[in-house]
Image (cartoon, grey):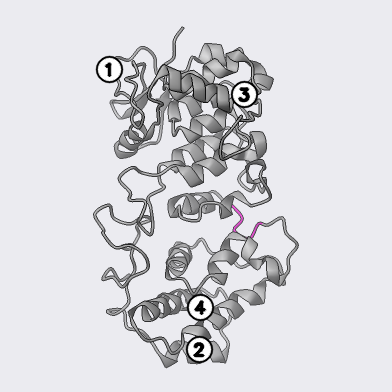
Amino acid sequence: MRYMTGLCVFFGTLVLACEETSGQSAECASATQSVEHINIEGLNAEMVDVLQEIVKCLPSEEAAQEHAENIGANAAVGIQLILKDLYLNTPPDLATLRTLGAENLNIVLHPRRDVFTHSTLLTEAVRQANYAWTMALLQSGADPNGSGSLMAYVAVTEIWDPRSKWTALFQDGAPAIPFLQAYLDFGGYLNTTQDGGYGNAPLIRSPVGNLAATVFLLEQGADPWLTENPPRRLNFNSTMMGRYIFGSLAADFNEIMYVLVTRGLYTPPPQPVYQPLVHDFYLESLEELSDASGPERRHKLWTLQKVVSAMIARNAFEPSQRMLELLASNPIPDDEGGWVLPEGQLHQDYDDARVGATLGSNVW
């Protein structure tokens, strides 16, 4: 039995359809005939199209075979053949995958040469941005927490909407969300700190540029103050919320925090040592930018004033008299400042040519 691939829409339901591959390197052939399918619920038509477009394929059987032998250098030939089919976007055969057993499904792959030192079948499916294969492996018993929940860390850092420019300040990482939802649905740890087996970074801290994934994980209940490091001032930045607060001299970090605060996703740190630092780091940034002049620094000050004011309004902390004085001393008017993101949006418009934290006209 051969594998199925591709994504099609039938009466509003996303279907993974069997198809022939065309040997393209960046895109996979569109579905031509449905032999069997797996229903995917809860995705709108636009996301269906994006998931179909982002699947990666290698250009030839020879290239796929070579890559499979490299990534699966420590694996049996049968596993390498499965990897080859994945790299060619050959349809995943559920019956075959289910016969592999947990040991083979979850084998830690050690490439002969690559930028990473280990992977798994499930992680390779995510790395190929192949939702069909990801679901097939999960349904066959692959462990979403395998190798330190590596699949989830890869999803939040490597999957993007192809319409989104890599130069954009806020790339659209929403296509990672179906992969994260599958990860959680099959038992993935929301508050893991395994860093995909590479360290101890929390999953919620990993999607630095993926605002959509950050919002999604927080909405699922991820702990924004999670850290494996002992709670002391030097480790404040090792938490997800701490990083954005500590980095509040950066306009994009302030914009992210404003989104999180206004969506009700900010929660005060449970660690007593961190609680006063939220106020203190914002105070330090206000002091630094208090005499801001010129477009870039005044824009940074505007974003800082907006996020601090939003946090005060929501009782995130009690402002000191000095903080109130600084907020009043050099107020930047809204018609001078401006967000890159329009209100309610989690990524930069695809036709927005602005790069970096520059003055804009989309004021919330």
* Placement of the C terminus among the 4 image quadrants: bottom left
> Does the CB distance between marks 1 and 3 fall below 8 Å?
no
Alpha-carbon span between mark 4 and mark 3: 55 Å
Q: Position of residue 358 (x, y in %)?
A: 33, 70
Q: Are marks 3 and 2 in contact (CB under 8 Å)?
A: no
Please say if the residues under marks 4 and 3 sit with CB atoms less than 8 Å apart.
no
Q: Nearer the viewer, mark 4 or mark 1?
A: 1
The span shown in magenta is: 222-226
Disc assigned to residue 32? 1
Label annotation for residue 324: 2
- Which of pointers 3 and 2 indicates the residue nearer the eye? 3
* Disc 4 from disc 1: Cα separation: 56 Å
Give the mark nearer the N terminus: 4 vs 3. Answer: 3
On residue 73, the disc is 3
Q: Is residue 91 visible?
A: no
Q: Residues within 10 Å of mark 4 (few under 14, many from 20)?
A: some
Magenta region includes residue 95: no
Provide the secondary structure element on which disc 1 rests. loop
| In the image, residue 62 above or below residue 280 | above
Residue 176 visible, this angle:
yes
Q: Mark 4 and mark 2: span between their CA atoms?
A: 10 Å
* Residue annotated with mark 4: 312
